[in-house]
Image (cartoon, rainbow, N blue to C red):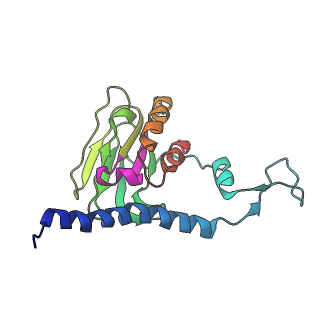
């Protein structure tokens, strides 16, 4: 009997990859199902009696997106995490607003993460960055605009973050490019839109 190592490795690794990729979606769906309680929300100027229309939690969240405030100081820390307040595979904080010339320190808090700009989602003429896996990286940003970055190994799980430096002069361009980027996500497909809505 001939033993084919290559074939047996594929038979072992392929189901594990499938389980890893799609288990995250099942987990996210389970969490959403547990917290998605039907409620009635009364917006200002609407009657709040029994006649008020029921609104889903998603619609309420979209209507009440909190805008990001300018971060204090000239040095900022962003952690790379497997799990945080915002879910799995995230940067924390995921959205920050800083001043021109500020420094951002990306901390490899959990293993197997990096921080790397998405070339189509930074201001024209700006320098991007590409951190090594499992290593901290510090960057100083001197060009105004919106920067979207990702963890390359977990990009398909929407492990992305957003930095606004000064004014969001390229926000429309970033939002247009986000549509292409979102199509590569296998879970958390609305995460990037949610982040950009905070600017």
Instruction: Determine if the magenta segment contains residue 178.
Output: no
**Can residue 159 be seen here?**
no
Magenta residues? 150-165
| Residue 177 appearing in the image | yes
Please identify the quadrant where the N terminus is shown. bottom left
Image quadrant where residue 154 sits: bottom left
Asked where in the image residue 80 lies, by quadrant, the reply is: bottom left
Toward the bottom, the furthest residue is: 1
Is 155 in the magenta? yes
Q: Is residue 95 above or below residue 121?
A: below
150 or 199: nearer the viewer? 150
- Which residue occupies the foreground of this view, 105 or 113? 113
Q: Residue at x 70, y 56 (%)?
A: 56
Lateral position of residue 135 relative to residue 93, left or right: left
Measuring from the top left, give residue 93's x and y in whole percent: 43, 55
Q: Residue at x 49, y 50 (%)?
A: 189
Which quarter of the picture shows residue 88? bottom left
């Amino acid at each position: 009997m001939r033993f084919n190592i290559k074939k047996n490795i594929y038979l072992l690794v392929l189901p594990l990859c499938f389980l890893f990729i799609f288990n995250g979606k099942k987990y996210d769906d389970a969490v959403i199902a547990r917290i998605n309680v039907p409620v009635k929300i009364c917006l200002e100027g609407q009657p709040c009696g029994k006649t008020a229309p029921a609104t889903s939690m998603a619609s309420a969240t979209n209507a009440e997106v909190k805008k990001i405030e300018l971060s204090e100081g000239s040095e900022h820390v962003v952690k790379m995490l497997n799990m945080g307040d915002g879910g799995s595979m995230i940067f924390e904080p995921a959205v920050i607003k800083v001043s021109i010339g500020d420094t951002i320190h990306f901390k490899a808090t959990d293993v197997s993460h990096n921080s790397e700009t998405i070339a189509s989602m930074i201001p024209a003429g700006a320098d991007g960055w590409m951190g090594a896996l499992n290593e901290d990286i510090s960057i100083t940003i001197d060009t105004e605009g919106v920067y979207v970055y990702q963890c390359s190994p977990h990009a398909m799980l929407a492990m992305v973050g957003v930095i606004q430096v000064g004014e969001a002069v390229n926000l429309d361009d970033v939002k247009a490019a986000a549509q292409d980027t979102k199509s590569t996500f296998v879970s958390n497909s609305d995460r990037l839109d949610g982040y950009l809505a905070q600017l």
